[in-house]
Image (cartoon, coloured by chain):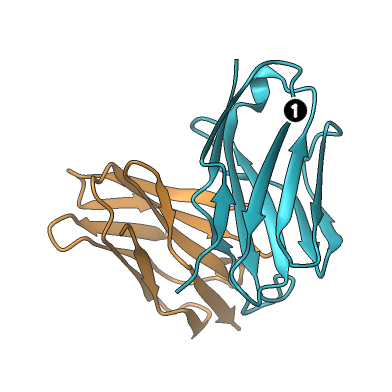
Amino acid sequence: AAGVIQSPRHLIKEKRETATLKCYPIPRHDTVYWYQQGPGQDPQFLISFYEKMQSDKGSIPDRFSAQQFSDYHSELNMSSLELGDSALYFCASSLGRGEVGNIQYFGAGTRLSVL
Amino acid sequence: KNQVEQSPQSLIILEGKNCTLQCNYTVSPFSNLRWYKQDTGRGPVSLTIMTFSENTKSNGRYTATLDADTKQSSLHITASQLSDSASYICVVRGNMLTFGGGTRLMVKP
């Protein structure tokens, strides 16, 4: 079965550069979530989209933005990168907005290293 | 191919009852296995982490087991509470993290 696809798998950037992470949800899933996981930490919710509209917002910095496109894939844009942005970025998708019974399926993550 | 399969996909139990969630994996090489609890609309919260040499680990009413030979893990919840209603996700670390699809637990009064 198709899973959540994230690209790239690894990304190395320098401070003050920009980065774009992509997420392709499971076919027919209409909701996408972004999480950031620092070393030794639990994933922190950043933002989610339902039917191409922002659904919920978590601890996403103002330097980051995201959107969901007409084909339901999502991109997380990160500007003015800082050393502290180095982390694993996970995308998850679900059918529906997280109501009871809806399960989020996670991608393998993108490891971002900011030098 | 690295895979993590969880069962059941969803579960409804009465408050006070016990339940066991299953996680089977084919991740290789194996580094560790972690159980997360994820409340609706929130990020996952780690419950337990187990390495190859650990068979059982408890965190309050949560007890996780690991059988590295059969590549199976379970999460046992005792004396369930309404606040246990959440998704429980099994994540196995090998060369990368592989997430299971989760079990959606609903505890009813």
Tell me which chain appears orange. B
From the image, state the color of chain A: cyan
For the C terminus of chain A, the quadrant is top right
Q: Amino acid under label 1?
A: Thr
Q: Is residue B2 left or right of residue A103?
A: left
**Residue at horizontal 21 percent and vertical 46 percent from the top:** B54
Q: Is residue B41 visible?
A: no
**Residue at horizontal 62 percent and vertical 53 percent from the top:** A91
For the N terminus of chain A, the quadrant is bottom left
Q: Nearer the viewer, residue B105 or A90?
A: A90
Q: Is residue B44 visible?
A: yes
Q: Nearer the viewer, residue A41 or A64?
A: A64
Where on the picture, by quarter, is residue A92?
bottom right
Q: Is residue B95 left or right of residue A98?
A: left
Image coordinates for residue A61, horizontal then vertical, percent:
81, 34
Q: Nearer the viewer, residue B18 or A84?
A: A84
User: Element under label 1?
Assistant: loop
Residue assigned mark 1: A18
